Image (spheres, helix red, strand yellow):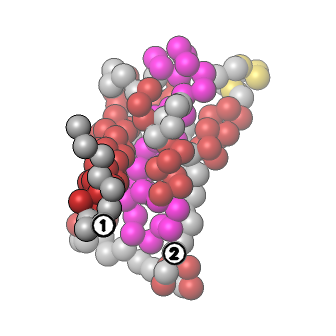
Amino acid sequence: FPVLRDLAVDMAVFFEKMKRARGWLEPSGEAAREPVRLAPESPERRRIEPHIECITCGICYAACGMVGHMPDYLGPAALNRAFTLAADSRDGAGAERLSEVCGEHGVWRCHSQFNCTEACPKGISPSDAIQALKRRALAGGARALAASFLRGLAPGSSRPTA
């Protein structure tokens, strides 16, 4: 981070990347009408629990070698936040968010060096969140490919031949 003065750094770029990753809940369904609570014992809540403890301090971002190498990379904090939202059933922006974080400067730029995980003062593993986003993206792509293939098998479709 650029130093502004002693013990003060400019985190504007860090927070801009949070915006690019759509780091806020966009409620859908019942959650859009009134707050919906995720029960602490629910499997969904347990899956995201460690990741929602992020205090947005930026230490993982500062420790990430890819952020230094590729300034447009979203970084581990923004991707960790995107994971918590993508895995939250109350959120309605999952597809758009996943599209953004799986773009040119998103999850595929993570080289799994685990510097972010090692540096986190809360013991969070942004690396795990990034890997989960990659799996989610691949699963979505596989579903789309399978649907496309199956449409080609439908009666009356023009399926390309080898």
Along the line of sight, which residue is nearer the eye, 63 or 30? Answer: 30
Under mark 1, the amino acid is Gly
Q: Are marks 1 and 2 in contact (CB under 8 Å)?
A: no
Along the line of sight, which residue is nearer the eye, 111 or 46? Answer: 111
Compared to 91, does 65 lie above or below?
A: above
Q: How many marks?
A: 2
**Magenta span has 79?**
yes
Q: Which residue is mark 2?
A: 28
Q: Residues within 10 Å of mark 2 (few under 14, many from 20)?
A: some
Q: Which image quadrant for residue 155?
A: bottom left
Along the line of sight, which residue is nearer the eye, 134 or 129? Answer: 134
Q: Residues within 10 Å of mark 1 (few under 14, many from 20)?
A: few
Q: Residue furthest right?
A: 4
Q: Which residues are magenta?
A: 65-94
Q: Earlier in the sequence, mark 1 or mark 2?
A: 2
Residue drawn at x 41%, y 50% is 83
Q: Which residue is mark 1?
A: 156
**Which percent across, then down, holds residue 150?**
25, 59
Residue drawn at x 47%, y 57% is 95
**Magenta span has 116?**
no
Compared to 34, does 66 lie above or below?
A: above
Regarding residue 143, the answer to whether it shows in the image is: no
**Which percent across, then down, holds residue 146?**
26, 54
Under mark 2, the amino acid is Ser
Q: Secondary structure at mark 1?
A: loop
Q: Which mark is residue 11?
A: none
**Which percent across, then down, holds residue 108?**
41, 31
- Image quadrant holding the C terminus, namely top left
**Which percent across, then down, holds residue 115?**
37, 23
Compared to 115, does 145 lie above or below?
A: below
Residue drawn at x 61%, y 38% is 17
